């Protein structure tokens, strides 16, 4: 009976089952013979198809088994002839393999060693040459810096010549010469073993000399500034007192510079700078005093204010003549304060804004908890005709200090305090909140209420600034 060959699809299906078996290691490899392996393979194929509910004929199973065994020992030769020759040489001749590998290793090691040693030697020579060049450059630069240091002994100014002598007594010139000698030894070819030591010594000496040179330069600058400020003061109309003060500062500065005392010399220079500024500003002070005094005379309706202003003008003039420029400026500032106060116009009104106190009471510091000493105050502020609140300088009777504030307390009698309290309690609004009026030409307000009302008492009495 002739068996019909299995179709290609059936064969491929069987081969696919074989591959699945091979991957899962399901094929029994311990069979004693090829027939036993084939039989085991047939059984396994049928089991796999049955598990997947696929019907397969015996012919298909047989074709798949035969195909699997036909491909099991197929060998595909190497396509490259050269690779094949080399492979056979290595496999078949163990001695030749050892010789080949040994030769290759020897050549590689010899070439690598020669290359590495030569490269290292070349790098060492290059690094040494670079280091020597950099060292020589550093030494030459140090010599240039030493030659660039100032030579104080060449100073022509008498005071700076004294300073140079003072520095030289401290070894300035010797230090420079020693540093130059050490630097030259560092460059000499016969001192290879000590080059670094000589260079280090030269650097140390240079830093020491440079510090002294910096001191000399600073002292020279201070002395020139002192001379310039003295000349500026002499050109100003400062009077004999200013010139005498300037001469004294110059002498003190000269003494400090000549002994190389930089801190003291600089301090005297700063004093001269301030003196020059004061003298310069003082040149305009006489005219400022006259202008302020003229304005006061024009607007003053208060004889006491005019007399106070005249006293301040005289005080400023006397201070100028005596060279007391700070005192002269202070007197001018007070004079201008009087001028400003006379020119101002405002009303003192009792504060009645919601959330703000209109009054307060206190016990004096020296009589705490004494009902008989209890003091009452109304809180006021200065309001200009345009409605602007004007800050005032107020003297507190509690602290004895003057502070600029916008609201403060004016002392009143208990009756006035209770009257204002009742007025505000009725409807929350003060019907009469005017406390005093300040007109142009007067230094103090005209009080309508309070302890100063109608008495002409000084306005700086009976006030507090906190409550």
Image (tube, rainbow, N blue to C red):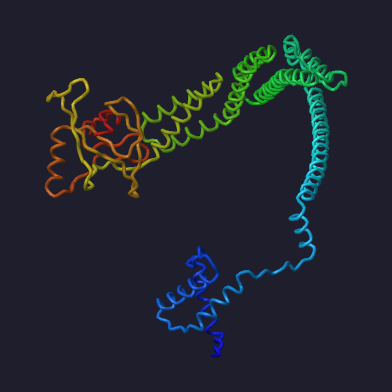
Disc count in the image? 0
Left or right of 344 on screen, residue 367: left
Q: In the rendered view, would you say 155 is above or below 44? A: above
Q: Position of residue 177 (x, y in %)?
A: 81, 15
Quadrant containing the N terminus in the rendered view: bottom right
The quarter in which the C terminus is drawn is top left
Q: Residue at x 76, y 62 (%)?
A: 84
Query: x%, y% of residue 355?
Result: 22, 46
Q: Residue 216: x, y in percent?
A: 71, 19
Please name the residue shown 37% across and 38% down the image: 441
Residue in front for this viewpoint, 305 or 150: 150
The quadrant holding residue 248 is top right
Residue 362 lies left or right of residue 288; in this view the side is left
**Residue occupying the far front of the picture:** 1
The outermost residue toward the right is 189
- Please, is residue 47 above or below residue 319 in the view? below
Query: Which residue is nearer to you in this view: 440 or 422?
Result: 422
Residue at x-position 33% and y-position 37%: 405
Residue 382 lies in quadrant = top left
Query: Residue 109: x, y in percent?
Result: 79, 42
Taking depth in this image into account, of 167 and 457 the one nearest to the observer is 167
Farthest-out residue, top: 169
């Amino acid at each position: 009976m002739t068996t019909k060959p299995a179709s290609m699809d059936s064969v491929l299906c069987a081969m696919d089952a074989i591959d699945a078996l091979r991957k899962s290691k399901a094929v029994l490899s311990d069979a004693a013979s090829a027939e036993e392996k084939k039989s085991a393979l047939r059984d396994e194929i049928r089991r796999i198809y049955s598990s997947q509910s696929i019907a397969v004929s015996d012919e298909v199973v047989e074709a798949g088994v035969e195909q699997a065994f036909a491909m099991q020992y197929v060998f595909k030769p190497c396509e490259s002839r050269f690779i094949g020759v080399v492979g056979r040489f290595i496999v078949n001749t163990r001695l030749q393999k050892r010789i080949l590998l040994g030769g290759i290793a020897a050549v590689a090691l010899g070439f690598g060693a020669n290359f590495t040693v030569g490269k290292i030697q070349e790098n060492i020579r290059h690094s040494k040459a670079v280091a020597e060049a950099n060292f020589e450059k550093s030494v030459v630069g140090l010599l240039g810096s030493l030659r660039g240091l100032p030579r104080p002994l060449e100073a022509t100014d008498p005071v700076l010549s004294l300073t140079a002598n003072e520095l030289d007594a401290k070894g300035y010139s010797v230090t420079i010469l020693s540093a130059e000698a050490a630097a030259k030894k560092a460059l000499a070819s016969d001192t290879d073993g000590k080059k670094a030591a000589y260079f280090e010594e030269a650097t140390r000496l240079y830093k020491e000399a440079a510090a002294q040179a910096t001191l000399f330069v600073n002292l020279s600058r201070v002395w020139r500034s002192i001379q310039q400020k003295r000349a500026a003061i002499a050109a100003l109309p400062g009077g004999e007192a200013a010139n005498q003060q300037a001469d004294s500062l110059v002498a003190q500065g000269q003494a400090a510079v000549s002994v190389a005392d930089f801190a003291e010399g600089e301090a005297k220079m700063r004093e001269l700078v301030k003196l020059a500024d004061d003298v310069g500003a003082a040149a305009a002070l006489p005219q400022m005093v006259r202008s302020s005094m003229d304005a006061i005379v024009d607007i003053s309706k208060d004889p006491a204010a005019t007399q106070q202003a005249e006293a301040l003008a005289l005080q400023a003039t006397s201070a100028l003549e005596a060279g007391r420029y700070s005192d002269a400026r202070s007197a001018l500032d007070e004079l201008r304060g009087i001028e400003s106060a006379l020119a101002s116009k405002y009303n003192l009104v009792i504060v009645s804004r919601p959330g703000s106190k209109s009054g307060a009471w206190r016990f004096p510091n020296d009589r705490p908890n004494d009902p008989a000493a209890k003091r009452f105050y109304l809180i006021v502020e200065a309001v200009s005709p345009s409605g602007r609140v004007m800050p005032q300088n107020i003297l507190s009777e509690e602290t004895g200090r003057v502070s600029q504030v916008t609201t403060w307390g004016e002392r009143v009698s208990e009756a006035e305090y209770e009257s204002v309290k009742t007025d505000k309690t009725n409807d929350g609004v003060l019907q009469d909140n005017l406390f005093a009026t300040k007109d142009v030409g007067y230094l103090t307000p005209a009080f309508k209420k309070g302890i100063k009302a109608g008495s002409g008492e000084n306005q700086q009495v009976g006030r507090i600034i906190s409550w």
